[in-house]
Image: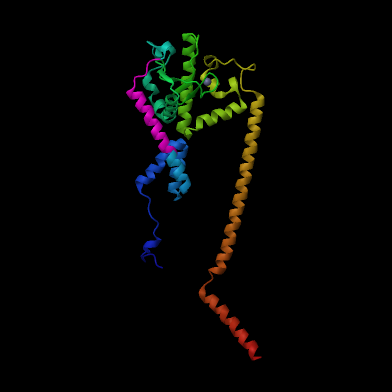
């Protein structure tokens, strides 16, 4: 076939519509952050199509996040949440914060997770209030948190702490507000599951006051007693490095076996392809020569 010959219609690969491609990239951004977005774009550029199963899972996860983010936006804009009692009449200047506007990007990035926490609080009949000093929302529910409380996006799920002084509550709210930025940066980088995964992984090797996220958020403000040695333990680092090296070694071995296997498969298909793809004339010539030899043997 020459270069100018028309290509049959059934051989032309169907083009993906730009709107569908953009929707796929946006869904990957929602589920996997910038890393997920870059993988999706790279896959499109290389002409790879995601499997049907992956498309369904990512689309569902993105749809859930859009719903929860919408709920968070609605509650935040429509209902005027009361200020949490110790912060009533205060603003960010008391804790050295710049302004509430600086928290806007954090609230947007955390909106899907925050909306999920708000829905949970609503289902449990929890009361909501907003810390006037840093914009985080406190949801008081009977359970659904670890230790004294857990930050989900920008929502602090906790229980009433009777007898706590206003100073103690202010310091704790600042500690939790720092966790909201950890949530936001991790979500921006790798999606809404990134921060809890990273936190749980860190907690495995560096529990309690040794946890790097807790240390960054401020141990004293969070009510943690400092570790006796004042930092992450040598045992934790040893375990972490050992498991990381072991995991890296296993991944390298797996990659090597996969590469070797695919090379063998390619070589095998090339060998069989060279026989099957032999020119028709050569086949015919060989067959004819065999037939001629056969006829000669009969003559003799
Ligand atoms: Zn904390």
205 w.r.t. 87: above or below: below
Quarter holding the N terminus? bottom left
89 displayed left or right of 255? left
Measured along the vertical axis of the image, is residue 193 above or below residue 19? above
Q: Position of residue 31 (x, y in %)?
A: 45, 37
Up the image or down, 285 lies above or below 33; here it is below
The answer to which of 8 and 200 lies nearer the viewer is 200
Identified at 56% across, 62% down, the residue is 270
Tell me which residue sits at (45%, 32%) in the image.
188
Q: Is residue 69 magenta?
A: yes
- 20 relative to 63, above or below: below
Image location (x, y in percent) of residue 171: 48, 13
The colour mode here is rainbow
x, y (%) of residue 176?
48, 20
Q: Nearer the viewer, residue 53 or 22?
A: 53
Return the x and y of residue 124 as percentages of the image width and height: 45, 24
From the viewer's perspective, tell me whether residue 258 is left or right of residue 53: right
The magenta-colored residue range is 61-83
Q: Is residue 46 left or right of residue 213?
A: left
Chief SS of the magenta region: helix
Q: Quadrant of residue 220?
A: top right
């Amino acid at each position: 076939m020459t270069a100018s010959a028309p290509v049959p219609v059934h051989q032309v690969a169907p083009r993906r519509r730009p709107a569908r491609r953009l929707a796929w990239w946006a869904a990957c951004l929602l589920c996997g952050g910038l890393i997920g977005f870059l993988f999706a774009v790279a896959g499109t550029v290389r002409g790879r199509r995601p499997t049907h199963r992956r498309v369904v899972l990512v689309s569902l996860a993105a749809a859930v996040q859009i719903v929860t983010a919408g709920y968070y936006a609605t509650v935040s804009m429509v209902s005027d949440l009361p200020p949490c009692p110790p912060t009533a009449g205060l603003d960010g200047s008391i804790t050295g914060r710049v302004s509430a506007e600086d928290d806007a990007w954090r609230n947007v990035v955390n909106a899907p997770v925050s909306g999920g926490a708000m829905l949970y609080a609503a289902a449990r009949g929890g009361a909501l209030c907003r810390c006037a000093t840093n914009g985080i929302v406190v949801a008081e529910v009977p359970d659904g948190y670890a230790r004294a409380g857990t930050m989900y996006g920008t929502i602090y799920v906790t229980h009433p702490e009777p007898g706590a002084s206003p100073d103690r509550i202010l310091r704790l709210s600042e500690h939790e507000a720092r966790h909201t930025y950890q949530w936001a940066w991790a979500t921006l980088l790798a999606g809404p599951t990134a921060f809890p995964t990273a936190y749980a992984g860190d907690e495995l090797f560096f529990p309690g006051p040794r946890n790097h996220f807790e240390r960054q958020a401020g141990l004293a403000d969070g009510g943690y007693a400092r570790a006796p040695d004042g930092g992450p333990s040598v045992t934790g680092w040893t375990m972490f490095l050992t498991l990381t090296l072991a995991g890296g070694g296993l991944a390298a071995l797996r990659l090597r076996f996969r590469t070797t296997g695919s090379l063998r498969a390619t070589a095998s298909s090339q060998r069989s392809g060279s026989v099957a793809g032999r020119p028709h004339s050569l086949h015919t010539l060989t067959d004819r020569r065999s037939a001629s030899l056969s006829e000669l043997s009969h003559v003799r």
